[in-house]
Image (spheres, rainbow, N blue to C red):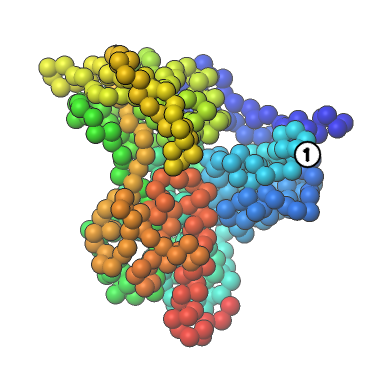
């Protein structure tokens, strides 16, 4: 029995040879039996390190206890008191680096599959609703409805701050630049990891809290933050993400066939380029594609390239596999699907034909030196090791920075040299009174759950700011 309790319940998956031909979800989710078996492994320890390891402080032991007792709907309700997006977090958050990393069960075998259980109860709740709209929720303090807050961006940070403030009772309006809400959750994460119907379901829950969403509104162009504050909003939260891709600045980068992962994934995920001409967004089907980078975005781009019909796909990364920043699960899925890893390799120029199309990539071999500021060993070029790699598509996935539009249209807003908004980490407050920020707009590209944690901090900061502004006259 002791040996049995140490075994982590596996997650069912689509077979690799099947899933590379479709955009259906790869991980199929726990059954009720799977969930009960996995929840029974939890020791219900008094220290609760998993809660401290969760950026949104879910009461993890209690929700797992409810699962073990078969009270799945109650477990879902409990999670939602701390996290408005449980089905999303259960799918894309790096639990292995957070709550699961500090789980006491690590000492006895493998940690509790907290993310998988979170996904299970969220999906169970949705299945029980039979597709009906979520019930309208009553706020904690209806008196707060006369105070309005604007949220810029409908990604994980924006949805979280909106949901938290709406639960308190504030009137909240989300302004989204694109034609559908979701931000990076919709344009940056493929359907096979986060189906759009799951995202829509979570957004509908946030709307059921009383949040309004306005799409096709580009803050800084359609209307400025200054104008929002002048037109009745007590505070503004900036959760506009990091949508400006970093490029390599090497020769040939302007060739046809060289594109950023942001553009590639947005065309396929949001604009349905994989279903052209049913959707009017074309995308060139690669024959031989190279994805430069080794984070989650790189894995998503490589796996998407396979699914739209690429014959060969390779990840090109200048460090070794040990330093790859993507989730271990995503790396394993990528390799299972047939993507090759070209490690300790770095492109130095792109080569094209007379028509301006990419035909090859010149790379150089690398070796690892001393650690750099990231703690990873610095890649050093090996002189004379250049070689050519035949490719017709190169997808650059080496990072993103915040779009400069809000920075240049908001007087007094202090930012870093690379464009991240400077905030008080305890409140999310920026240098402009009444303006708060969080998520990738502050940190640069990071994880969904980190952005959500920042959203919770900012919601409390905005609440305190409005209360102080009105001399603590607000009850509740």
Residue 201: x and y in percent read 51, 47
**In the image as oriented, which residue stretches furthest toward the left?**
354
* Disc 1 residue crowd, few under 14, some 14–19, many 20+, Cα 10 Å: many
**Relative depth, front residue between 257 and 169:** 257
**Quadrant for the N terminus in the image:** top right
Relative to 391, 324 lies left or right:
right
Res. 425 in view: yes
**Relative depth, front residue between 451 and 200:** 451
Residue 308: x and y in percent read 37, 23
Q: Looking at the image, is 191 positioned above or below residue 49?
A: above
What residue is drawn where x is 27% and y is 19%? 361
> Mark 1 — residue?
41
Res. 36 in view: no
**Quadrant for the C terminus in the image:** bottom right
**Relative depth, front residue between 384 and 24:** 384
Residue 403: x and y in percent read 29, 50
Relative to 464, 443 lies left or right:
left
Picture quadrant of residue 152: bottom left
What residue is drawn where x is 55% and y is 45%? 89
Residue 122: x and y in percent read 61, 46
State how many labels appear. Answer: 1
**In the image as oriented, which residue stretches furthest toward the right?**
1
What residue is drawn where x is 77% and y is 43%? 42
């Amino acid at each position: 029995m002791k040996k049995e309790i140490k075994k982590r319940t596996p997650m069912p998956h689509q077979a690799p040879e099947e899933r590379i031909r479709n955009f259906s979800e790869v991980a199929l989710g726990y059954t009720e039996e799977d969930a009960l078996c996995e929840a029974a492994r939890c020791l219900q320890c008094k220290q609760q390190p998993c809660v401290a390891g969760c950026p949104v402080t879910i009461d993890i032991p209690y929700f797992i206890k409810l699962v073990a007792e078969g009270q799945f709907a109650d477990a879902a309700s409990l999670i939602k008191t701390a996290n408005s997006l449980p089905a999303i977090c259960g799918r894309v958050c790096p639990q292995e680096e957070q709550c699961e990393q500090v789980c006491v069960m690590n000492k006895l075998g493998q940690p509790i599959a907290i993310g998988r259980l979170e996904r299970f109860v969220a999906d169970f709740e949705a299945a029980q609703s039979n597709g009906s709209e979520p019930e309208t929720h009553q706020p904690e303090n209806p008196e707060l409805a006369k105070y309005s807050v604007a949220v810029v961006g409908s990604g994980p940070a924006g949805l979280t701050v909106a949901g938290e403030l709406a639960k308190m009772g504030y009137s909240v309006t989300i302004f989204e630049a694109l034609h559908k809400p979701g931000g990076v959750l919709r344009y940056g994460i493929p359907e096979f990891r986060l189906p759009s119907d799951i995202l829509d379901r979570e957004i509908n829950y946030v709307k059921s809290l009383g949040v309004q969403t306005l799409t096709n509104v580009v803050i800084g162009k359609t209307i400025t933050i200054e104008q929002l504050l002048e037109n009745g909003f007590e505070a503004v939260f900036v959760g506009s993400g990091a949508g400006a891709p970093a490029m390599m600045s090497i020769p040939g980068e302007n060739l046809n066939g060289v594109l950023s992962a942001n553009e590639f994934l947005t065309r396929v995920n949001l604009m349905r380029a994989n279903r052209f001409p049913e959707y009017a967004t074309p995308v060139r089907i690669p024959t031989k594609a190279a994805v430069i980078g080794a984070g989650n975005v790189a894995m998503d781009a490589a796996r998407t390239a396979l699914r739209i019909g690429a014959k060969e796909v390779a990840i090109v990364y200048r460090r070794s596999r040990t330093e790859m920043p993507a989730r271990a699960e995503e790396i394993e899925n990528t390799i299972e699907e047939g993507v090759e890893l070209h490690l300790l390799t770095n492109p130095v120029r792109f080569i094209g034909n007379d028509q301006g199309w990419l035909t090859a990539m010149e790379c150089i071999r690398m070796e690892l030196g001393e650690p750099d500021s990231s703690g990873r060993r610095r890649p050093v070029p090996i002189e004379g090791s250049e070689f050519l790699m035949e490719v017709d598509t190169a997808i650059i996935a080496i990072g993103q920075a915040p779009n400069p539009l809000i920075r240049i249209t908001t007087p007094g807003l202090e930012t870093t040299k690379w464009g991240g908004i400077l905030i008080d980490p305890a409140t999310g407050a920026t240098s402009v009174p009444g303006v708060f920020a969080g998520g990738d707009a502050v940190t640069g590209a990071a994880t969904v759950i980190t952005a959500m944690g920042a959203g919770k901090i900012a919601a409390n900061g905005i609440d305190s700011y409005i209360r102080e502004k009105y001399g603590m006259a607000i009850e509740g």
